[in-house]
Amino acid sequence: MKVAFLIIGDEILCGKTKDANLQTLALKLEEKGHSLTEVRVVADEETAIIKAIKELSTLYEIVFTSGGIGSTHDDITTESIAKAFGASLKINPEAMKILANFYKLKNLEFNAERQKMAVIPDGALLVHNNLTFAPGFVLDNVYVFAGIPQIFNAMLEEALKTIPNAPKTHSLSIETTKVTEGNIAHELRELQAKYTKKVAIGSYPKMHENGSFSLQITFRSTNLEDATNCKKEAEELIRSKI
Amino acid sequence: MKVAFLIIGDEILCGKTKDANLQTLALKLEEKGHSLTEVRVVADEETAIIKAIKELSTLYEIVFTSGGIGSTHDDITTESIAKAFGASLKINPEAMKILANFYKLKNLEFNAERQKMAVIPDGALLVHNNLTFAPGFVLDNVYVFAGIPQIFNAMLEEALKTIPNAPKTHSLSIETTKVTEGNIAHELRELQAKYTKKVAIGSYPKMHENGSFSLQITFRSTNLEDATNCKKEAEELIRSKI
């Protein structure tokens, strides 16, 4: 399944906060055999959110979002997603019950702002989290989660239970300082041609703090044998260069 | 100026690599008074890159890209961007000279794969980097940089010299454990209404390792006095809650 991720938040775009959810989502999807195909980051702005949701939910089978479902004035994700799908907003009785219990236990007032977190688009299903209990939801093919990494993660775990597995992509890799990219690029191109449509070879130079470089070469395939054979041939190529 | 960032790379989408360039770019743009308005991540796939470049370069005044300008078969950014603008690819004599000198000094063969890094779209201007000397370039309103963070950063520094400053957005913040979001949401909404169009108030709960929460409230404005006054009022509101 082709999946998109929409990160909603001014704090990411102005550099205040470093996103921590993209990699979590990517790795968990990989485990289930699905691939993240596109990611977007937009501001806490209704028009930007609606435009991105309309486009991504049409282009991809599943869309995940993070951010903007809390209780403050700058949390406008829920309303924006309802508008994108032409859905009305309604108090969800199950969410109301869960939140009322949670705040009662915490001895905190369940005020109007906190009750706002029980308002979700009509037709959406709740996605629970066992940390703050304020639920995310799924509307159509869009899963709407909190931005706080621990809560995003809890909601993702919950949602992934309902998404079927697909054949997993195996990812093998070599890390070497014996050759540089320019040294092996010609041979890797030929190797990729040999394994066209079987294995995707990736080449990633990394610069270390002392200014030296290492090279990581990855071999991705749904067929583990193909990936293993391709990797062996690449190791041979590297040896021939030393 | 409204700016977009296109991150190109399978390694980000599959979770192998955590992007490190978004925050760097966001913070440097903020310093110059510009704002990052949208970010996208796409795979090393020609159609995906061309589509994103066409859309973003039309929607925004400046677009930065990272990734895919090295010497291996999976580096297809340069060709894709040339196609997006209908430009032909040409050997750039200045880039050839710089790279030839660099590999001569390093006592490495300046082979066909390395020479590929001197091929850029016709009409593009080079963006130099003093680390690996393989240049990035700017074509139309799109700045095309390497993905390796140190090199991305070097190219960005070089490019920013040519981009004019604009009035800076001042960003003040309060970090508190004295109130939670639900506790102060009503008052923050009223404060935001009072400072409409003057100050953007953001509210960001953070969950710590021990499960406790803190709240960061930010006050962003091009007018430092407005931001300062708004922050003072928020501090007063927090005090009244304790």
Image (tube, coloured by chain):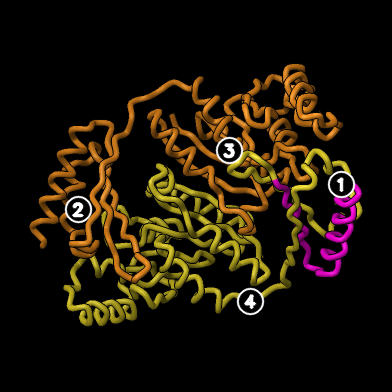
Chain colours: A yellow, B orange
How busy is the neighbourhood of tag 3: few (under 14 within 10 Å), some, or many (20 plus)? Answer: many
Q: Left or right of A190: which side holds B199?
A: left
Q: Amino acid at mark 4?
A: Pro
Q: Quadrant of residue A182?
A: top right
How busy is the neighbourhood of tag 1: few (under 14 within 10 Å), some, or many (20 plus)? Answer: few
| Residue position for label 4 | A164
Precedes in sequence: disc 1 or disc 4: 4
What whole-number distance in Å separates the C-alpha atoms at marks 4 and 3? 40 Å
Dot label at residue B150: 3
The boundaries of the magenta stretch are A214-242
Question: Do callouts 1 and 3 point to residues on the same chain?
Answer: no
Secondary structure under tag 3 reads helix
Residue A12's spot in the image, x, y percent?
Answer: 43, 48
| Residue position for label 2 | B188
User: Image point 56% across, 49% down: which residue?
Assistant: B19
Q: Amino acid at mark 2?
A: Leu
Question: Do the residues under discs 1 and 3 have CB atoms within 8 angstroms?
Answer: no
What whole-number distance in Å separates the C-alpha atoms at marks 1 and 3? 27 Å
What whole-number distance in Å separates the C-alpha atoms at marks 2 and 4? 42 Å
Q: Left or right of B74: which side holds B228?
A: left
In-front residue for pair A8/A235: A235
| Residue position for label 1 | A242
How busy is the neighbourhood of tag 4: few (under 14 within 10 Å), some, or many (20 plus)? Answer: few
